[in-house]
Each structure stands twice: as C-alpha cells, then as structure tokens.
Image (cartoon, rainbow, N blue to C red):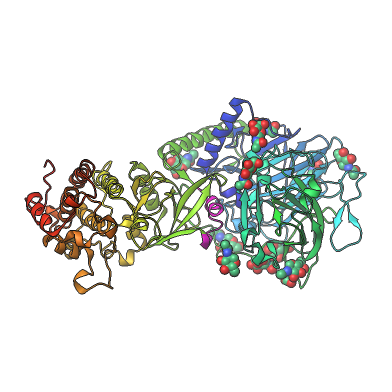
C-alpha cells in the first residue's frame, strides 16, 4: 500500500530529487498536466508553516485558515527528529475528539492522512485506536496506525470524496470508546482537488462493467473511495512530486506479481494522449510494462498473475492502464488476451490497439468487482490474471493498476490487520547511528499562556531545524560521494534477483547484471550474502572508504543499497567479463601477447594505487584472474578490493581463517598469519603465470609436480624450460627478451620471503619494459623463437640479485 512506497525514498534522495525538480523549474518546463484548484497541506501540531522535501508548503495550525475545534484538553507534540521530515516531525494527539474545519470549494478531492508510527512519550502507541470522519463519510473506524503500518515507520491513507456546494469539510478524529485511554493522533493532512470525474461517473454515464453481474455499476457523489493499490507495473515507484499534479505516489509491483514475467521499458517512445487525458497517470507508467516475454510459449497456458490482499465484503473499483509500445504490435488483432479479475472474466478479447486506436496511445479500462465475505476471512486476495488469446503475437501486457475500495452506505472502515510478531511491544529501540532517534517535547497548551507557548515552540522549531541541518552536513556520506539505491530500484534492475540475471557467484554472494535508470545503464550488482551480522555503521564506513578509491584501473563503485538487512553494491558493468574468461576453459579467442601485457600492467597499476591508498595501505587479499575485469575498451580493472574487511565482519565466527583463493595464497602469509601488501604481490605473480601459461593455478588432473602452477612455473623457469609450459597459442609470437623479462618479474613476485618480492610500482616498470621489448623486437621470427639454450643464456643475463628488479636494463 502507499505507506510502503513512501519509505523507499530516503531523505537524501528526496532532497536530490527536489534539487532536480528545482532545476527543471528554472528551465521552465515544470507545468504539470493538471493544476489542482485546491492544494492544501497541513502540518499538524506545528505552529508555523514549513517547506517540506517535496517543495510544498505545509501550513502550520496557528494559521487560522484551518481552525481546529476541540472542546477538552489538547496536546501538541513535537518530535525532535534528527532525521525525518515534514509533516512527520510534529503531530496532534488527544484523548478526546477534535476536528479540523477546512473550507473548500465544491468538487471531488483527494484526502491524504499522514501518520508517523512512533512511540510518543505519555502515549502508548498500542492505545491509539480511533475513528476518522470526513463530512458524512466514515473513513476509518477503530483504526490502529501501528497495526496498519506493518512495521513501517510512516503510513499514508488516501481517500476520494466529493464535496457539495460551498461546504466546509469537517475532518473529525474520535478515540475509540471501547478501549480505555484510547487516543487519536495525526501528523499531516493533504487535500488536493482532482479533475472532474477522474474516477467518479458523470451524471449521464451508464456505469462501468460490474464483473459477474448483468448490470453496470455506477457510483456518484455519495460514494467515497479508499486507495488500496496504485502500481507502476514493471516499472519503478514514482514519488508524489513526479505525478501529473495530484501528488499521487505510485509503487512498483514486485510485492504483488506472483508468476514469472519479464518487464519491458521503452523510454524513447513519444506518447499520444488521444484516448485519455494526459493527467490520467505519469508518462513513465505507460513506458514500462510487464509481459510474459520470450518464454511465452511455455507460459501460453498459464496466467500472468498479481495478488492484492483486500478487505472482504466490499466492492472494488479496478483501473488497468495499458499502452502498446512494441513495434511488432501495431494493428488490432496483433496482441489479444484474456483478463480475469478475482477469477471472473473481465475481458475475453483484450486488444489494446483496438481500444486506444494505435501504438503508443495510452488507454485505461475500468471495472468493479465485489469481494464477498467467504468463510469469515478479514482479507482476501483480489487477483488480476492475464492469459494470451489468439493473436499474431502470443502474449499479454499490463502497464499500471489502481485499486480502490468503494464505500458502503458512506462507510469505508475495514478491520485492522493482525499484529505482526512483537509489534504490540513498544517500538524497537531507535538505532542511534541511523539517525532514527526521536525525542519528544510535550507542550501542554492551556497551562501556559498561548503567547508564551507559541514563542517557546517557535524557538524549539528553530532549534530542531538547525540541528537537522547540522546533522545533514556531518553526514556527507553517501549520496554526494556515491549513490544510494533503494531496494526497489535494485529489484527493478535485476527483475527481483532473477536467477537468469546472475553473472557470477562468489564467496561474498551473487553478482547480477542489471539495468538502472529505467533500463538505460548496465551495472553489476553484488548482493552480499544475506543474514550477515554486519552493522549499518561498518557497512557505511566501508562504502565511504571504497567510494573514495577512484582509479582508471579499479572497478568503480557507483552506489550501494542498505535496506531490509540487504547489503548491495553497485558497480560499473565490465562488458568483457573476467581476465580468466579470455585465458582458458573458454570459447573466446586467445589474446595476443601485447594485449595480455597491457592488461597485466593495468592491473598492476590498480594494485599499486590500492597499496599506496588515499590514506592507508589497502591490501586486496584476493588477487586473481577472476577479480581482474575487462571494460568495453579492453582496459583491465581490479575488482573486489576493500571487501575483505567487510567479509571478516560478516563472518565473525571464521574470521581468523586465512583469506584468499586457493592457488594464489602467499605461503608466507599462510605460515605467519601476518598480512602485508606483499601477499598481493605473490598472488599477482600467480596471475602472471596464468596469463603466460593459460592454465588454472591449481590443476589436479596434472602430475603431482605440476598441480600448483606457481611451483611448476618456478621449477621450469629455473630449468630454463618456461617456454614449454606457456600457452601454445603464444608459441612463436613472443619476442624472447620480452618473455624473459616477464618471467623474471613473475618469479620475483613469487619469492618465498615477502621482503624479497618487488613493490607493485617495480612490477609495473618491469612489465612495461617487457612490453617495450616485445614492441621493439621482431615478432614470431624463427631466429628469435624461444628454445632451451637461449633461455639459459638470457636467464643468466637477466636475473641478478634475488628479488628486486633491475629495471634499468
Ligand atoms: C501546490 O502548492 C505548492 C505550495 O504549497 C506549490 O508549490 C505547488 O506548485 C502547488 N502544486 C500545484 C500542482 O499547483
Ligand atoms: C534534540 O536531540 C538532540 C540530540 O538527541 C539534542 O542535542 C537536542 O538538544 C534536542 N533538541 C531539543 C529541542 O530537545
Ligand atoms: C502499552 O499498552 C500495551 C497494551 O495495552 C501494554 O501491553 C504495554 O505494556 C504498554 N506499554 C507501555 C510502555 O506502557
Ligand atoms: C464535525 O463533525 C463532528 C462529527 O461528525 C461533530 O461532532 C462536530 O460537531 C462537527 N463540527 C462542526 C464545526 O461542524
Ligand atoms: C458530483 O459533484 C460534482 C461537483 O460538485 C458535479 O459536477 C457532478 O455533476 C456531480 N455528479 C453527480 C452524478 O451528481
Ligand atoms: C523504443 O522506441 C523507439 C522509438 O519508437 C524505437 O526506435 C526503439 O526501437 C524502441 N526500442 C525498443 C527496445 O523497443
Ligand atoms: C519525440 O518528440 C520529440 C519532441 O517533440 C522529438 O524531438 C523526438 O524526435 C520524438 N521522438 C520520436 C522517436 O519520435
Ligand atoms: C523457459 O521455460 C523453460 C521451461 O521451464 C525453462 O527451462 C527456461 O529456463 C525458461 N527460459 C527463460 C529464458 O526463462
Ligand atoms: C488462469 O486464471 C483463470 C481465472 O482464475 C483460471 O480459470 C484458469 O484456470 C487459469 N489458467 C491456468 C493455466 O492456471
Ligand atoms: C480465485 O480462485 C482461487 C483458486 O481457485 C481461490 O483461492 C480464490 O479464493 C478465488 N478468489 C476469489 C475472489 O474468489
Ligand atoms: C494472497 O496471495 C499471496 C501470494 O500468492 C499469498 O502469499 C497469500 O497467502 C494470499 N492471501 C490470502 C488471504 O489468500
Ligand atoms: C478494534 O481493533 C482491535 C484490533 O484489531 C480488535 O481487537 C478490537 O476487537 C476492535 N474493537 C472494535 C470495537 O471493533
């Protein structure tokens, strides 16, 4: 429901969004398709007007435009929020009934009630049971925000009502009488006009299709609606500021889709609003959709299904949004499908092109369905199922869904959801570092003179604001260094962690290929194994460190996600995969020697940068050919750096174990358990051997002596037979001096004692020399062809000293 989508926007991203909106405003393109006549937002419990993150002005209550009528003791509560935003910073709580009287013009309006589900000192949240009436309509009865929020921090309830001529709207909050010490509370109220008959039926209208009944269903001004679901199908959630002017929030559909499906996005199409008004839904609703996809022949006889829990015993208004955007679907009859709503056939021949009049023309269709009370269940699923019918293109499509409950005799109230485990306990202790700490000041108005109270509260608001700003600047991380992604965005990018999107599996977890920014940018998404013990703070610290590391030979961290116990890192996508993918056990064509050298130099430079570090030395601890990735332009980049510490923290029970990959492990580290950057140098030596020999570091199919590549290569090098174990593809293509220089560098890296291994800067120089020797020499010529005797000669010539390289030669 709406509260869920609300939560997925962090304050930072909202501020960013606002900045974006602001920029658009400056350019002068911000006129929404619909300008509401009434556009009211009340910041309950606040005495002054405040600008919220969405740029809207939330009126304080002292502003007597919207008087509050309340006979008995009233209490305003100020929450000292270090995060949190208007209208959730202040609220109004009362043990007795109170009303807001809001002067409105006639017409149909959205009413949105904002609740901040938090513990209010002196008010036990589990005692908040109340009714809300708006004019003649009962919107909520015996309502518990705590139970409805299902663990979320904020909750928004949205209704539609029609106001008759020149009425004042009286919104009344009444604590339940059945519960002792029950109280009512509210944090924010929004009233936004809607275009005439956006959902309501005009007087001359026959009504909408009433499923399972022979008559049509018409609902007029005496009916109130409650929004249950408003989804962007296959797309990302859309915040209120990006709606068409009505400030509606649209969620994504991941929680509701229950069958395999594909989503499709085409951001480059231009839409033509010739069948419905352009304010019906944001354009992005119509640019994203779900279809059965390439596997539709397999799915031909099954349904594309969504399940929506709703209250039993009400009628529901269902609006389905469609827009064909595939070039192949252009004529009526191209894509025809069946639509079932709550198991009833809503359409037997759904044909979007026939309805809308063409491709890229948005269209919606409305239905009403009754959900009967079966077996006394509070909640039942209202399902939407699509199933291909005969057509040239066997598939089905859906772009958006809206589901509203229709009032019964002016009453919309439904039961409270069942409590989630532990929810009746006072709210979980706030976590200091995540900034969720709320402190509360209760001002008892009426005891002090109004003036004194008002000036005190004004002072407090100032303090709250200034502490908020101070807080923001000290928490520079992360959005200004690297981007915070919501879990929804990550799920949208990976089709909800679809197995088909996995491009790698590692010790840290799976790596997915995904697309962000509505499918336009490919990224690699690393989902660290769930259920780890790591705290938010450590993760944040790691991200901070990683996002400061910028080098052309490191895979950049683009962003991260830390929601619902998930720890996810988002990286640039490396088109050509891992270096190993181009060396052995592969169908890729072999790489030329120069190319290999350049990749080794690049990777060595990346490691050198890490070892020098912006502040401290960073030891990679897992240097291997699968952690060296290749970009579109074949530039090698080191990946997976800095995660080692994180991995330690997330596996505390095994944290004393030696880290690294088998076959690459520095024997000295293994023996002494003491980590230095020279362990990375050893592993890099193994990488160099792999690059030369195109075989795995450990190959158990080999002879005993040859199992370990590092040992075998050292053995061959010392016997002058390195050429016999090198990649057969390279035979005759390497200039001998280049090979010898390369072999020398590799062997020095593999030195038993760490201090005898070169620094990465020396490795870079050595490899550059090998490249120069290759480029200046004559290639693949028989005279320069490596053979046993020459190897021995050059061996003597090029290896002097026992570890450091003689780069100058
Ligand atoms: C609604 O009111 C706010 C001021 O509170 C204003 O900034 C905004 O533009 C208005 N929205 C529309 C769609 O007119
Ligand atoms: C709000 O909380 C912060 C930190 O918890 C505290 O420093 C500040 O004094 C509080 N402000 C008020 C008005 O109590
Ligand atoms: C709040 O009320 C519930 C149920 O009435 C009770 O179990 C709980 O102990 C109360 N909590 C506090 C902090 O008083
Ligand atoms: C507002 O409505 C409530 C409940 O319907 C009623 O008790 C109250 O008198 C009304 N107030 C005004 C000013 O109309
Ligand atoms: C409902 O109210 C609106 C605005 O007051 C009016 O334009 C419309 O005609 C009414 N509809 C019906 C069916 O009475
Ligand atoms: C998206 O629409 C544009 C414009 O019609 C078209 O050129 C392009 O091929 C479409 N892309 C996809 C993936 O369908
Ligand atoms: C979409 O409309 C814009 C502005 O009118 C135009 O520049 C662009 O070429 C159109 N794109 C397509 C695919 O028709
Ligand atoms: C299509 O369905 C078949 C049968 O279940 C399955 O094996 C295959 O992996 C599916 N392909 C895709 C791309 O989902
Ligand atoms: C699709 O859904 C409809 C309506 O619930 C049902 O009658 C039909 O059996 C379903 N088809 C399949 C293959 O599940
Ligand atoms: C639809 O059919 C399913 C399975 O047959 C059943 O579980 C569900 O209760 C039905 N839904 C309604 C609203 O009748
Ligand atoms: C609704 O459907 C979901 C997904 O299939 C299922 O997990 C849930 O139990 C269903 N709820 C009810 C009330 O049938
Ligand atoms: C109010 O809601 C609570 C929690 O769902 C329920 O236990 C109680 O019976 C309800 N009371 C009334 C009077 O409906």
Residue at the image position 26 percent from the left and 64 percent from the top = 663
Rendered location of residue 527, percent (x, y): 45, 57
Please say whether residue 71 is visible from this viewpoint. no
Rendered location of residue 338, percent (x, y): 77, 61
**Quadrant including the N terminus:** bottom right
Instruction: Please tell me whether residue 63 is drawn above or below residue 794 in the rendered image.
Output: above
Q: Is residue 491 magenta?
A: yes
Please say whether residue 567 is visible from this viewpoint. yes
Instruction: In this rendered view, identify the residue nearer to me: 413 or 503.
Output: 503
Quarter residue 148 falls in: bottom right
Residue at the image position 13 percent from the left and 43 percent from the top = 807
Instruction: In this rendered view, identify the residue nearer to me: 263 or 532.
Output: 263
Relative placement, left or right, of 330 versus 536 is right
Instruction: In this rendered view, identify the residue nearer to me: 797 or 781.
Output: 781
Instruction: In this rendered view, identify the residue nearer to me: 192 or 267.
Output: 267
Relative placement, left or right, of 656 versus 795 is right
Residue span colored magenta: 485-500
Quarter residue 786 falls in: bottom left
Question: Ligand 7 is located in which of the four quadrants?
Answer: top right
Q: Is residue 33 magenta?
A: no
Rendered location of residue 45, percent (x, y): 62, 40
């Amino acid at each position: 429901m709406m509260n869920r989508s609300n939560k997925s926007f962090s304050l930072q991203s909202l501020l960013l969004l606002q900045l974006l909106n602001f920029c658009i405003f400056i350019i002068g393109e911000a006129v929404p398709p619909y300008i509401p006549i009434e556009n009211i937002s009340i910041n309950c419990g606040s005495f002054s007007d405040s600008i919220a993150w969405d740029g809207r002005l939330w009126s304080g209550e002292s502003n007597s435009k919207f008087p509050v009528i309340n006979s008995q003791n009233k209490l305003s509560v100020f929450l000292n929020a270090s995060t949190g935003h208007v209208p959730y910073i202040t609220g109004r709580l009362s043990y007795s009934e109170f009303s807001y009287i809001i002067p409105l013009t006639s017409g149909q309006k959205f009413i949105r009630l904002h609740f901040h589900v938090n513990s209010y000192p002196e008010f036990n949240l589990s005692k908040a049971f109340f009714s809300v009436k708006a004019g003649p309509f009962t919107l909520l009865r015996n309502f518990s925000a705590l139970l409805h929020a299902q663990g979320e921090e904020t909750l928004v309830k949205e209704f539609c009502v029609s106001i008759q001529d020149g009425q004042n709207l009286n919104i009344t909050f009444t604590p339940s009488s059945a519960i002792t010490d029950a109280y009512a509370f509210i944090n924010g109220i929004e009233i936004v006009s809607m275009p005439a008959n956006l959902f309501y039926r005009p007087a001359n209208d026959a009504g909408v299709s009433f499923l399972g009944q022979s008559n049509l269903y018409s609902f007029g001004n005496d009916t109130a609606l409650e929004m249950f679901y408003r989804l962007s199908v296959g797309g990302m959630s859309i915040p209120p500021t990006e709606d068409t002017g009505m400030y509606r929030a649209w969620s994504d559909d991941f929680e509701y889709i229950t069958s395999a499906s594909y989503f499709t996005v085409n951001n480059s199409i231009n839409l033509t609003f010739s069948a419905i008004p352009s304010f019906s839904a944001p354009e992005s609703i119509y640019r994203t959709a779900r279809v059965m996809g390439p596997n539709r022949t397999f799915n031909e006889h099954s349904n594309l299904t969504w399940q929506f829990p709703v209250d039993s015993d009400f009628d529901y208004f269902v609006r389905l949004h469609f827009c064909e955007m595939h070039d192949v679907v252009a004529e009526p009859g191209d894509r025809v499908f069946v639509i079932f709503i709550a198991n009833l056939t809503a359409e037997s021949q759904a044909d979007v092109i026939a309805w809308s009049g063409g491709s890229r023309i948005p269209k919606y269709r409305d239905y009403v369905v009754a959900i009967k009370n079966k077996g006394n269940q509070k909640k039942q699923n209202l399902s939407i199922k699509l199933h291909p019918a005969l057509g040239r293109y066997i598939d089905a499509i859906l772009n958006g869904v809206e589901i509203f409950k229709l009032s019964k005799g002016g009453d919309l109230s439904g039961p409270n959801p069942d409590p989630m485990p532990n929810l009746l306990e006072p709210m979980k202790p706030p976590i200091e570092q995540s900034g969720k700490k709320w402190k509360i000041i209760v001002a008892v108005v009426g005891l002090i003179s109004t003036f004194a109270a008002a000036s005190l509260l004004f002072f407090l608001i100032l303090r709250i604001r200034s502490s908020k700003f101070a807080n923001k600047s000290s928490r520079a991380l992360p959005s200004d260094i690297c981007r915070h992604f919501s879990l929804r965005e990550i799920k949208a990018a990976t089709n909800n962690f679809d197995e088909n999107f996995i491009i790698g599996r590692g010790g840290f977890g799976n790596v997915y290929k995904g697309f962000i920014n509505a499918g336009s940018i490919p990224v690699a998404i690393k989902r660290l194994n769930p259920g780890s013990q790591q705290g938010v703070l450590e993760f944040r610290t790691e991200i901070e460190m990683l996002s400061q590391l910028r080098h052309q030979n490191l895979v950049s961290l683009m962003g991260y996600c830390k929601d619902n116990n998930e720890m996810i890192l988002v990286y640039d996508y490396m088109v050509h995969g891992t270096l190993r993918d181009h060396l052995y056990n592969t169908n890729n064509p072999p790489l030329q020697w120069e190319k290999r050298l350049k990749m080794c130099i690049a990777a060595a430079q990346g490691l050198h940068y890490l070892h020098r570090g912006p502040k401290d030395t960073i030891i990679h601890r897992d240097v291997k050919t699968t952690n060296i990735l290749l970009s579109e332009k074949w530039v090698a980049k080191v990946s997976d750096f800095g995660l080692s510490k994180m991995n330690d923290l997330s596996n505390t029970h095994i944290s004393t174990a030696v880290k690294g990959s088998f076959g690459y492990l520095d024997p000295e580290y293994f023996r002494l358990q003491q980590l230095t950057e020279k362990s990375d140098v050893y592993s890099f030596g193994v990488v160099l051997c792999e690059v030369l020999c195109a075989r795995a570091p450990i190959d158990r199919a080999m002879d005993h002596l040859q199992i370990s590549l590092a040992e075998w290569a050292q053995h061959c090098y010392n016997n002058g037979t390195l050429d016999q174990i090198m990649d057969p593809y390279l035979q005759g293509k390497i200039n001998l001096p280049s090979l010898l220089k390369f072999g020398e560098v590799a062997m020095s890296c593999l030195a038993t004692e760490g201090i005898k291994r070169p620094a990465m800067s020396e490795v870079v120089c050595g490899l550059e020399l090998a490249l120069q020797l290759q480029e200046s020499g004559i290639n693949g010529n028989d005279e320069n062809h490596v053979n046993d005797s020459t190897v021995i000669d050059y061996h003597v010539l090029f290896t002097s000293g026992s570890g450091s390289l003689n780069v100058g030669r």
